[in-house]
Amino acid sequence: MEYIFEEKFKVRDYECDLQGIVNNANYQHYMEHARHEYIQTLGVSFSKLHDEGIDLVVVRVDIRFKNSLRSGDEFVCKLNIKKEALKYVFYQDIYRISDNKLCARGVVESVATKDGQLCANEEIDRQLGL
């Protein structure tokens, strides 16, 4: 897959469960943080959009777990984005840096709403380069 953005992380002890591996819910946190960082690099402000009545909301998340991360592991979350009808679809992969193993593969679908109603938003499309 071709990626357009990546964000580096390091696993913190409290993100792990009793098995010593990262709890599954944390992978979604990592992916969300990477998406937000990517969008901010484009100059898109979630708070400014919200003040205008526009919200970008997640409507579906699918994460496939491949290899477990452990405390202290450094990893990178890479992403790409595509537009499918009214959806913004983020393709996100998490790789452990030490061995470049794929740890998780995610597909996150988001939509734009204006005053709570689903909408097409050409300005957001332009800002995201879509």
Image (tube, grey):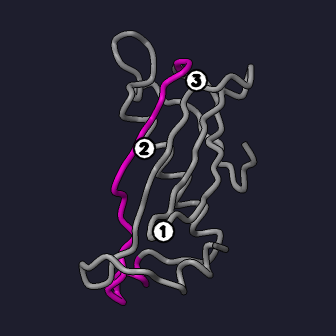
* Dot in front, 2 or 3: 2
Label 2: state its secondary structure. helix
Quarter of the image that includes the C terminus:
bottom right
Indicate which disc residue 101 carries: none
Q: Which amino acid does the dot numbered 3 rest on?
A: Gly
Q: Which amino acid does the dot numbered 1 rest on?
A: Ala
Q: Which of the marked residues, 1 or 3, is nearer the chain's N terminus?
A: 3
- Residue highlighted by disc 2: 29
Q: How far apart are the alpha carbons under marks 1 and 2?
A: 26 Å
Q: Which residues are magenta?
A: 47-69
Q: Which of the marked residues, 2 or 3, is nearer the chain's N terminus?
A: 2
Q: Nearer the viewer, residue 108 or 72?
A: 108
Proximity of marks 2 and 3: CB atoms separated by less than 8 Å = no
Q: Which amino acid does the dot numbered 2 rest on?
A: His
Residue at (38% x, 25% y) in the render: 23
Residue 125 in the magenta stretch? The answer is no
Q: Which of the marked residues, 1 or 2, is nearer the chain's N terminus?
A: 2
Label 1: state its secondary structure. loop
Residue 49 in the magenta stretch? The answer is yes
- Residue highlighted by disc 1: 85
Q: In this figure, what is the number of numbered marks?
A: 3
What percent of the width, then of the height, locates residue 95?
Answer: 65, 31
- Residue highlighted by disc 3: 72
What percent of the width, then of the height, locates residue 36?
Answer: 51, 61
What percent of the width, then of the height, locates residue 106?
Answer: 51, 40
